[in-house]
Amino acid sequence: MRWTLKPKPNPETVNALAKSLQIDAPIASLLVQRGIEDFEDAKSFFRPSLDHLHDPYLMKDMDKAVVRIQQAIVNNENILVYGDYDVDGTTSVALMSSYLLTKTSQVATYIPDRYGEGYGVSYKGIDFAEDNDFSLIIALDCGVKAVDKVAYAKEKNIDFIICDHHRPGAIIPDAVAVLDPKQDDCNYPYKELCGCGVGFKLIQALAGKDGETIEDLIPYLDLVATAIGADIVPITGENRVLAYHGLQVVNQNPRAGFKAIINQLKKDTLTITDVVFTIAPRINAAGRMKHGQYAVDLLTEVDLPTAIKYAEEIEAFNTDRREADKTITIEALEQIIENKEENRLTSVVYQEDWHKGVIGIVASRLIETYYRPTLVFTKSGDKLAASARSVSGFDVYNALEACSEHIEQFGGHMYAAGLTLKEENYEAFKQAFEDEVSKTIDKNLLTPEIKIDTTIALNAIDDKFWRIIKQFAPFGPGNMTPIFMSENLKDTGYGKCVGADDKHLRITVTDGQAKFVCIGFNLGEKLNLIKDKKPFKAVYSVDENHWQGNVSLQLKLRDLKA
């Protein structure tokens, strides 16, 4: 691990903020690092208000989208709500379809089959629309690159409205409206919405025309918060407001589908982390193992007993997904060793029978062992399909763009992308990708980095400190959980390895002033560093330990050094 201490913010700004908010300097320092420098900034940060959401009409083409949907409702046209099969796509479809059904009964949903159609807008989906007399398709979390598909639909007199957040290509599809804040000529102030967020802006605009307020749309925010967490978009600005209020819906008044999943979890209050690691994988499992429509059915179901039945089906898909991802990860790691590729700067692996639904997860798992840009390929029809994942700070989308002569199709983000290519181009692509990464990556990025917010003494951590830190949530990119470093620590003599295979470390540390119980997941091998009261330094976050009805503060260790 590389430990990087963030630059200290301006002490005068920190002191002024500490004074105006009546908080201690370490907390004020964390706020200034997050761009919060005065009382008003802090108020917006700690009390995210729905009043701070931007006017949806600032988004390019929003007026055109609203007019076309209103026309469809008035004329009783059939509207097809189309979305990708991942969490962002299925939550978007659930959001848009359930909202439109409050205005018209002429609404249906369509999720492409991951195996038969692949990612995004498909010809098969458009043919389905034609066969069933749909004259308007609203595409969510996909479509901004579907130039040919939109033209094909136009030939069949089917209009498209696109709500996307991926980077557009050089040509924008000839749709009635393209809502995507990442378009160069879109002046929308916040560029980091997820697909479901863009969909929410559209229903916000529609609701305004019908005299509804933002308060009327709060029940939809559980979907938006889940998509924000699952799609790993920054939890800053508008996303922070949407995630904050969406989590309140998840915890206080969730839709039947979420309630059914939460019932399985036996957990009282869910954080954004719980949403990412417990709710999102289950929603994703439907599209990975069976079909994304199962997720939409769960998320739009209003009858709780029926939703519980759907949630049980999806839980079974999730169990299958876990098994598949475990098996394929082992096979992929063996392949890297057999091919003597441990020392490359990229991991590119392929086996034709790997389950297409889990290759993205496997790519992330491989990065846990070999920290470098990674692609996992499988056979998909007569082509190979891959999921790409990257390491912090490296843009895998740009690297794929540089290898595009070998690729049929690709799309995605800086850290996650998907592509297809012809099997005969696999080896050439694999070498080109290795060459491109070797040429462009800063070699430091190949060692995982822990960014440390600040150094503190253990006695700075008390109940008041923790109460304020908790209000920094929801955490995510752009507002990560604060990470601290303390030096000259010693174990009080009771440190030990715990868990299966002694993988984890449990110690009680002191710096002479205060002491805390610490848990270090996957740090079991560091026991020798702290034995016999040897001094060490630690990087950690502050956490709560719930045990037999008691709640106490503990430190969650990220790394230790002598």
Image: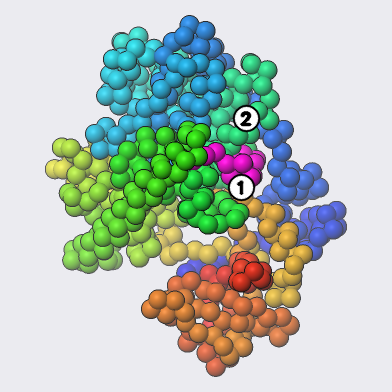
| Residue 194 visible in the picture | no
Instruction: Identify the residue under disc 1.
Output: 251
* Image-based side of 313 in relation to 433, left or right: right
Tell me the number on the disc at residue 191: none
* Residue type highlighted by circle 1: Asn
The magenta region covers 240-257
Residue 137 in the image: above or below residue 219: above
Residue 267 placement (x, y as % from top left): 55, 57
Instruction: Identify the residue under disc 2.
Output: 217
242 is within the stretch colored magenta: yes
| Residue 121 visible in the picture | yes
The residue nearer to you, when weighing 248 against 430, is 248
Most frequent secondary structure within the magenta stretch: helix
What residue is drawn where x is 65% and y is 28%?
A: 216
Question: Which quadrant holds residue 59?
Answer: top right
Q: Secondary structure at mark 1?
A: helix
What residue is drawn where x is 41% and y is 22%?
A: 108
Q: Secondary structure at mark 2?
A: helix
